[in-house]
Each structure stands twice: as structure tokens, then as C-alpha cells.
Image: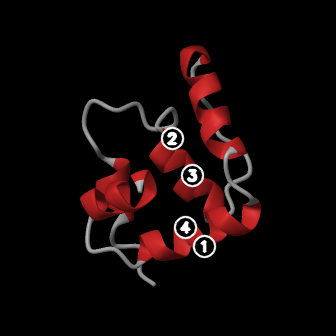
Amino acid sequence: PTLSVLPGLISTPHVPFWGDPVRSLVLAGLGVKELSVSTPQIATVKAALRGHSSAELRDLAQRALGQADAAAVRALVKG
């Protein structure tokens, strides 16, 4: 797996970094234990994370790392 897709995922314009459920799911799957999220985004991120087990998030992150670009990662995560 490669981390080459992460810069594109991180630098997506007009989307607050930590409040984005796609980014939050991938980061949690990579082992990030704490995220700083603005108050209006807490419920959305929590709901996204609660919808997946730790094993599912790890698997998702590994599959995300194999994608060609950030758009492919978003498509993968959004199913």
C-alpha cells in the first residue's frame, strides 16, 4: 500500500479536514485515535465511525491506500 493518495484526500478544497466523514474513517482505520472536530460536525463524524467496526475501518484504510487518487478513495468509502 502507498500513502500517495493521502495528500489529495487531505487537501480537498472547501471541506473542513477533520469534520469530513471520509477522512475520519480512513484516519481511524490507519490508527488515529483522536480527531479534533468542530461542534457542528461531531454528530456526523460520530455516526460515520459508529457504523463500522475497528476491523472494518482497518480494512477500509488498507483498500484506500491502494487507490490511485483521492477521488477513488472517496468513491470507495462512499460505496
Which amino acid, mark 3? Leu
First in sequence, mark 2 or 1: give its number.
2
**74 on left or right of 26:** left
Tell me the residue that label 2 is attached to. 21
Q: Quadrant of residue 55 in the image?
A: bottom right
Which circle marks residue 25 in the picture?
3
Badge 1 element: helix
Q: Is residue 54 above or below residue 10?
A: below
Q: How is the image coloured?
A: secondary structure
Crowd band around label 3 with a 10 angstrom C-alpha radius: few (<14), some (14–19), many (20+): many
Residues at circles 3 and 4 in contact by the CB criterion of under 8 Å:
yes
Q: Residue at the bottom extreme?
A: 1
Tell me the residue that label 4 is attached to. 60
Percent position (x, y) of residue 30?
A: 61, 65
Badge 3 element: helix
Q: Quadrant of residue 17 in the image?
A: top left
State the quadrant of the C terminus: bottom left
Tell me the residue that label 1 is attached to. 59
Q: Quadrant of residue 54 in the image?
A: bottom right
Residues at circles 1 and 4 in contact by the CB criterion of under 8 Å:
yes
Crowd band around label 2 with a 10 angstrom C-alpha radius: few (<14), some (14–19), many (20+): many
First in sequence, mark 1 or 3: give its number.
3
Percent position (x, y) of residue 73?
A: 36, 62
Residues at circles 3 and 2 in contact by the CB criterion of under 8 Å:
yes
Cα distance in 3D space between marks 2 and 1? 16 Å
**35 on left or right of 19:** right
First in sequence, mark 4 or 2: give its number.
2
Cα distance in 3D space between marks 1 and 3? 11 Å
